[in-house]
Image (tube, rainbow, N blue to C red):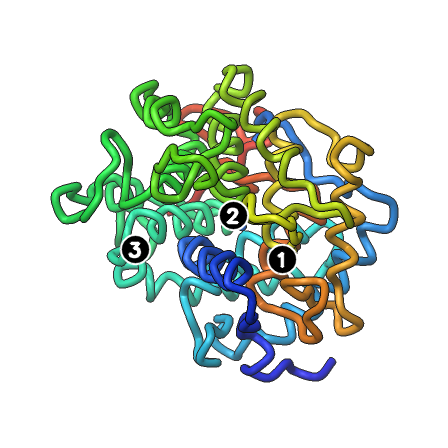
Amino acid sequence: MPRPSPARLRPAIHAGAARLAAALLLVVLTALSPHATLGQTATPVVHGADAHLVAATDWLLALQDDSGAFPGFTGEPDPGTTTDAVIALYAARESDPRASAALERAVSSLEGEAKGYAGIGAGQAAKLAMAAVAGGHDPRVFGGVDLLVAMQAVPTETIEHPIPGIYGADLYSHALVILAIAAAGEPIADAAIAPFHATQNDAGGWAFDGSTDAGAADSNTTALILQALAASGHGDDPMVARGLAFLKSLLAPDGGFASGTTDPLVADANSTALVIQALIATGQNPAAAEWGNAPAALARFQTPSGGLRYLADDEEPNLLATLQAIPALAGAPLPVAIGCAAGESPGTGGCLPLAA
C-alpha cells in the first residue's frame, strides 16, 4: 500500500466560519487525543464493519516508521499521534492480525518520549497512561514516569480560566484523566465527578471550556464525558440521559453527528466516532434508527485508500479522523483496555496484567 504523504495528514481548511471553528476545536481536542463494563468486548457494531476496520487499520499501519512511531502534522514522528495510534491498534487487534505487533513497536517508541510528552499537560499524560495499559505496561512506571501522578499534578494557578475541581486545563482533559484512572484499575473519587454536575448546560451537553452558555456545548466533549461517567461507575447518573439527549440533537439530516449546534448541522467523522463510543459505553445501540445508524454513517467517510476523511466533501483521508474512527468501528469505547487492580486475577472482568 502506498505510504500517504504528510500533506494528506493535515485537516482541510474550510471557508465557512462555523466549519472552521469546528475544525479548530477538533484539532485541540484530538491533540489531547478519540466503558460500559470491565467485561465488555470490542465487537463490530454494523454489518461489514470488519472490512471497514481492516481497511482503516491498513492505511494507518502504512504510516508507522522504523522506530515504531507515527507522524504528526509535520510528517515527523510524534508522540501524540503515536499514543492515539496505540489506542486504535489495540481496538483493532482482533480484526487485523498485524495490529498487535505494530502496537508493541509503537509502545516501545513511546517509552523514551514519556517524560517529555506527559509534561505537556494532564490530558497528554492521561492519553499516554491509557496507551501504556493497552500495551500491557504499568502506567505508574512507564518510561520512568508515574503517569497517574503526572496527570493529576497540574497546578490550577497556572491555568488562565480554571474550572474548580478538575484535572488539567479543561473538561476534555479532566475526562481523559478519569478514563486513565479507570484504565489503571484505580477507583475514582466522587469529587472528580462533581465538576460534570456543575458544568452540564440546560440542553444536557458540555463545552470544552466548561461554559454553560447556550450553544457552547459540543459533541466531542459531551461524548468523552459520557464515556468517563460510564467508566467511573456513574453510567446511571441522570446526567447521562441528558447528555444522550443533547447528542441526539446533533444528528445531522444526512447521518452522522456534528461537532456543535451551528445550523445547518454538518456531520464529521471525528464527532460521529466519539458519539458511537459514548453510545456503546452507555448501553445504547448506535446502529439503531434513532441514532441514524451511526456506524454506517461513519463508514461513509472512508475513502478508497482506507483512511477516513474529516468531512463528507473532503477528498483526502485525514489521520486524526482515521485514528478516532478505528476504535468506533471496532465497537470499543474508552478506555479500550483496563489493567488489573492489585490482587486481581487477569481473568477477572477481562482486565490485563500490567508489567513494569
Labels 1 and 3: the sequence-earlier one: 1
Gap in angstroms between the C-alphas marked 2 and 3: 17 Å
Label 1 packing within 10 angstroms: few (<14), some (14-19), many (20+): some
Gap in angstroms between the C-alphas marked 2 and 1: 10 Å
**x%, y% of residue 298?**
73, 52
Gap in angstroms between the C-alphas marked 1 and 3: 24 Å
Q: Compared with residue 181, is residue 266 higher up or lower down, i.e. above or below?
A: below
Labels 2 and 1: the sequence-earlier one: 1
Amino acid residing under circle 3: Ala
Residue behind mark 1: 100
**x%, y% of residue 113?**
33, 65
- The residue tagged with tag 3: helix, strand or loop? helix
Labels 2 and 3: the sequence-earlier one: 3
- The residue tagged with tag 2: helix, strand or loop? helix
Going 53% across and 74% down the picture, which residue do you hit? 10
Viewer-side residue, 130 vs 354: 130
Going 35% across and 53% down the picture, which residue do you hit? 124
Question: Would residue 238 appear left or right of 94 to someone viewing this image?
Answer: left
CB of mark 2 within 8 Å of CB of mark 3?
no
Q: Quadrant of residue 294?
A: top right
Between marks 1 and 3 in the image, the one whose residue lies nearer the viewer = 3
